Amino acid sequence: MPCERWLRSLQLGSLGRAAEKIGRSQSAVSQQMRKLEGQLGQPLFRRQGRVVVLTETGELVHSYARRILDLNDEAVGAAAGTSVEGAVRFGLPGDFAETWLPAALGQFRKAHPAVRIDVEVERNGVLLERLDRGEFDLVLAMGYGSRPDARRLATLPMTWIGPAGSGAVLRPDAPLDLALYHSPCFFRRAGIEALDKASISWRLAYTTASLQSLWAGVAAGLGITLRTTAGIPPLLMRLDERHGLPPLPVVELCLHSGKGEPSAALSRLERLVIDHADGNLGML
């Protein structure tokens, strides 16, 4: 496939390595590239030391080649998706309900129109309790990496979070105000343990069972909280040792599947969540 050879050449910096990667001879790949340059009437490659790099025209053609491959993959996926049927019940925490995950689920819905996907947002512990009762087929959850059904997607740092523009949050004459979920909550436990270890006095000033309510309370200055670095609202900011706060542990983000052999629809959804997690959580 000409587009594939073209992109391999760019990614590997060598026509020889590209040929080896796609199982063709170097002469065949070189001939294909020369044919493409002849059709366009302009050079696409130039040498820079020992590697092959793009000319300005090459950059332009490269962008079109990638779009052609993306459209090919989309067409193949759409055709395959029409043959997948069934229903998938998926649960996720609120931390990912307003960032990259809904868009990924929307792509899944378009690619697999015959699959009914039911999505619910809940607290991590509640999600897994319901998974164990058979109410979900797939759950994305934080803090339960020790479960035998856990498939780790990422290890995320916890962070203290306060209102945007926060200065010093510790006062010598008063305990630190905290805004936390109701117990049990592993974020709540981790924060309190870190403060106690650092001998920092605290008081529970604001409690809630809703992530949106938690963000609102922190933004209003009712207390600081802690979550992961994923999905922090723009009105809030990360706090750290510069604000006098102790370090926090990391938390594992995992996929958990229900019992039994997964359906084709469930396997497709699991693969999509894994792929999008790789792209969206790698920089956190």
Image (tube, rainbow, N blue to C red):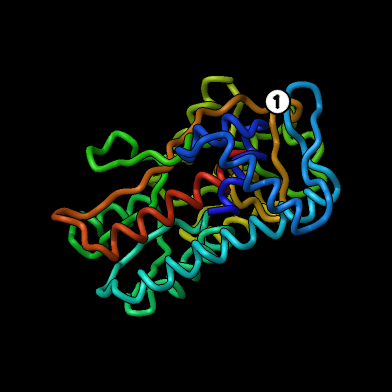
Q: Quadrant of residue 51?
A: top right
Residue drawn at the location 25% of the way across and 59% of the way down = 130
The residue furthest bottom is 114
Could you tell me which secondary element the residue under label 1 belongs to?
helix
Residue drawn at the location 52% of the way across and 37% of the way down = 156
Residue drawn at the location 33% of the way across and 79% of the way down = 114
Report which residue position mark 1 lands on: 241
Q: Position of residue 44 (x, y in %)?
A: 78, 46
Q: Position of residue 259 (x, y in %)?
A: 16, 53
Residue 148 shown left or right of residue 185 in the figure: left
Most foreground residue, 257 or 169:
257
Q: Position of residue 118 (x, y in %)?
A: 35, 73
In the rendered view of the protein, which quadrant contains the C terminus?
Answer: top right
Residue 71 higher or lower than 250, as above or below: below
**Residue 284 visible in image:** no
Residue 225 shown left or right of residue 58 in the figure: left
Most foreground residue, 107 or 187:
107
Most foreground residue, 224 or 236:
236
Residue 62 higher or lower than 203, as above or below: below
Number of numbered discs on residues: 1
Q: Quadrant of residue 174?
A: top right
Residue drawn at the location 39% of the way across and 52% of the way down = 140
What kind of residue is marked 1?
A: Glu
**Residue 127 visible in image:** yes
